[in-house]
Amino acid sequence: MSELFLDSLMLITYYYSICFLLDPKLLESKITERLRLLILCSPSNPTGSVYPKELLEEIARIVAKHPRLLVLSDEIYEHIIYAPATHMSFASLPGMWDRTLTVNGFSKAFSMIGWRLGYIAGPKHFVAACGKIQSQFTSRASSIAQKAVVAALGLGHVVTKMVIGSSPLILYCQ
């Protein structure tokens, strides 16, 4: 192998490890017929990593090759990111809506940390199955938390406004 190739390979490996991003080549090499769920977390806490669109598209191409593989995309920090990063929902990529369960909520974006009000979005049959499981673990959200979310949605993303004026204290990779 050429020295340039090895240097490039080392740089790519370093980039994925220092930025806490999934290496598509490594992912593809590890997928077996037994794998049923890939969990993605972008934006990620505590690393601050945000998957760029190109990398998500590459992961989507890999997922598309495995018809029994689903993706659980944790996007709770979508509004708490620093420029120049932009959030892209994995489910919005071509062919991924039917293969993705998106987990999100109001606690982070609206600084409602103690109320833990979240949601899951995805194909109807997956969401219905999740609802059956959830109903056995917990009761409904409190009425005050529900009213607070309605008010917060009317105000906009308050935490996003605070993030714009601050600087990140963590390594940012995109």
Image: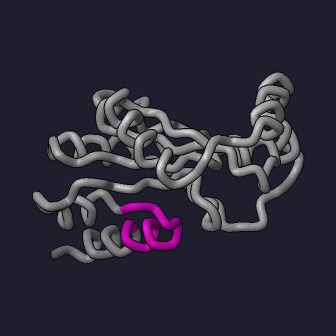
Q: Residue at x 36, y 29 (%)?
A: 123
Q: Residue at x 47, y 51 (%)?
A: 136
- 118 relative to 148 in the view: left or right: left
Q: Picture coordinates of residue 32 (x, y %)? A: 13, 62
Q: Which quadrant: the N terminus?
A: bottom left
Asked if the stretch drawn in magenta spans residue 107, the answer is no
Q: Residue at x 82, y 48 (%)?
A: 111
- 135 relative to 129 in the view: left or right: right
In this view, which residue lies farthest toward the left?
A: 33
Q: How was the colour assigned to the protein in this rendering? A: one colour
Residue 83 lies in quadrant: top right
In this view, which residue lies farthest toward the top?
A: 154
Q: Picture coordinates of residue 173 (x, y %)? A: 58, 59
Magenta stretch, overall SS: helix
- 54 relative to 150 in the view: left or right: left
Q: Picture coordinates of residue 71 (x, y %)? A: 34, 47
Quick check: can you spot residue 155?
yes
Q: Residue at x 52, y 44 (%)?
A: 103
**Which residues fall within the magenta stretch?**
12-22
- From the viewer's perspective, is residue 74 above or below residue 86? below
Quick check: can you spot residue 105?
no
Question: What is the number of callouts on the image?
Answer: 0
